[in-house]
Amino acid sequence: MRAWTPLALMICVSATIVPAGGEQDARGNTMNTPTVWATGDGVRVNPVTGRYFEDQPEVHKDYPTGDYARSNPVWDAKAGKVTLRAARNEFAAFQLVVARPEGAGPLEGVQVRLDKLVGPGGAQITPPHVSLYKAWYVQVKQKSTRYDHLSLRPGWYADPLIPAPAGEGLRFDIPDARNAIGPSQRNQTVWVDIFVPPDRQAAPPGVYKGDLTVTCPAGSQTVAVELNVWDFALPDEIHCRGDIWNGTLKQMPPEQELGYYQMARRHRFQPGVCFYRPKLTVEGTQVTLDWTDYDARVGKYLDGTAFTKEHGYWGPGMGVPIGHMVLPFDCERGAKKSRAWPAPTPDGGPTPEFEAVWLETARQVKAHFEADPRMRKVEKILFIDSLDESYYQAAYDKMIYFCKLLRRGLGEGWFKYRIDGGYNSPAMRQLADYVDLWVCATIGFDQPKIQRFRDRVEPWFYGSVIYETTQSGGENGSNTLLDLDVLTGRCLGWIAWKYRCGYCAWEFDAHWIEGGPHRPLANWTEAINFRKGDAAFNGSGLLIYRGEFIGSDQPVASIRLKAHRRGFQDYEYFWLLKEAGEGPAADRIVNSIIHGQPLGWDAAGKTENWKNNPEAWDAARIEAGNMLDKMARK
């Protein structure tokens, strides 16, 4: 009996091609018959060469290499098999690569379908839980600034994932005329997502089978899919504390915004939005708040109805509210009085009338959220954004002042007071008695400093998680770039577990060209989306693409967003192990991958803080999954 490697989703791929005519080579083989192979979700395949972008040992010696189109941990061409595993309430993913033979002409009318999987007792996994996406390629023309070594070089990178039309398969040509790679394109990646329902009766453990078909005028192939489901489920709640900051959702129509929140929930993160606000009227010290528009827009996220069938949602966290929200308060930033809410500080300093307005507004805000028991459960965060990353004494004094003021109005302990910045120890000694949540820049996230204040302040990290110099990525704050490997996204959950902290990432819808307008549709065709001075970054703060480019008002996920999801799902494995009394095992697994200390000043220039082969990460996850499955079956 053959011992199979236990990876999450077991997919058997028949290599049989049924010819349908076409030009033949000297040996009589049909020249325009495509070849098909598969790989995991932790790499990207170059559409020109058919090789991994990560196949560059000069960047990292342990990157995957070799003849992986014939054999890799999820693909065995000789046996015609892909092997993966998944828990319930989890997404498993793989990539199918359709390759046009060298020397052959254009390959037109390729169709890919996967309609359902059938498992124990006739249980079925059907669309939209089975989803196919065509990868779109974005051309990187230059390395991201100050990532001279870690950049995976110029080329066409798969990133946006265009979903198949509802109820239909994917259709495409190679080369893709709209993507404009040109005749050099010989490969097209198809991303496959399979979501295992959370309920054990709906998805009992065992093997699920289905047929994925690849057809074109030159022939057809059948891909036999076997999904082996472990006997445990990932939780509905998101236990990796944190969010991804966003500045554009509030500018969208509510229904379009809803699509982004739902995509975020399916990928196990929460948008961090500052600030949703009720309508405010102030006359003297009299305050009136109108919550009508606020509740219509935000209420469904605070009570969880945004993530129900009523609003078209499916996926993890059905009916679960968002974990935290940012309260509407802010002060002026210098002369920018319009940022202040409910009122700017008078030029001469706070007055009794000014404080009366703030205190009355705070009273009404608290009363509104306390009136709804569902909204009571959402953690309230106070963040004075106008004092963001402010490193001077007057700013510290204002932080303390507004914390004291709002503790009077809202009550101490009703909210968590948050500050963002890489503050030094003298500053934190002043602030620690007032701050509950410290979102610290990664390069300033030195362990002795963090540990010194941890008993009073919850730490989160934000910014670049790998930096060649002290300045790498510092201008934009993004943790991941298009021309870095996707482990820079997956690692967020693992680093958060290792450091016992939360995370904050900058943006998922960014297009920031200094002095220019926000042009998010340009992200589909222009890799550099962030410029400041002499710094230029590829795909900075960009995880979700605007669907308008393909004629949709819905968001389009990226491969890098899938990598973030994979890491956040991994975190839930570690959480489950700890809940089962196996916390040391979770720590051992994480430390076997994240073997260095990637955060803090000492990490600058150290680019070997974790294993760089995603196959090692997958094996570690599978070890954790096998442990949980074994415990569930006792």
Image: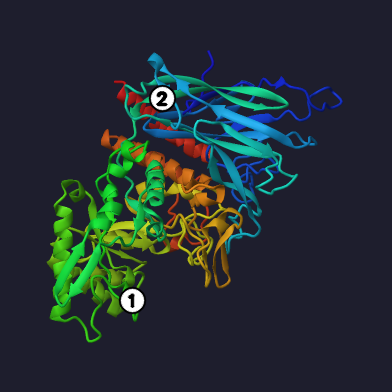
At mark 2, the secondary structure is strand
In the drawing, what numbered circle is on residue 243? Answer: none
Name the foreground residue: 88 vs 497: 88
Image height check: is 95 above or below 346?
Answer: above
- Residue 4 locus on image (x, y percent): 51, 21
Q: How many marks?
A: 2
Determine crowd level at label 1: few under 14, some 14-19, many 20+ residues with C-alpha closer than 10 A. some
Q: Residue at x 23, y 82 (%)?
A: 346
Q: Label 1 amino acid?
A: Arg
Which colour style is shown? rainbow
Q: Label 2 amino acid?
A: Val
Name the foreground residue: 184 vs 58: 184
Marks 1/2: CA–CA distance: 53 Å
- Residue 624 locus on image (x, y percent): 39, 33
- Point out the residue furthest to the bottom here: 348
Q: Residue at x 42, y 29 (%)?
A: 86
Name the foreground residue: 161 vs 450: 161
What residue does disc 2 label?
229
What residue does disc 1 label?
333
- Point out the residue furthest to the right here: 26
Q: Is residue 223 left or right of residue 332?
A: right
Label located before the other in sequence (1 or 2)? 2
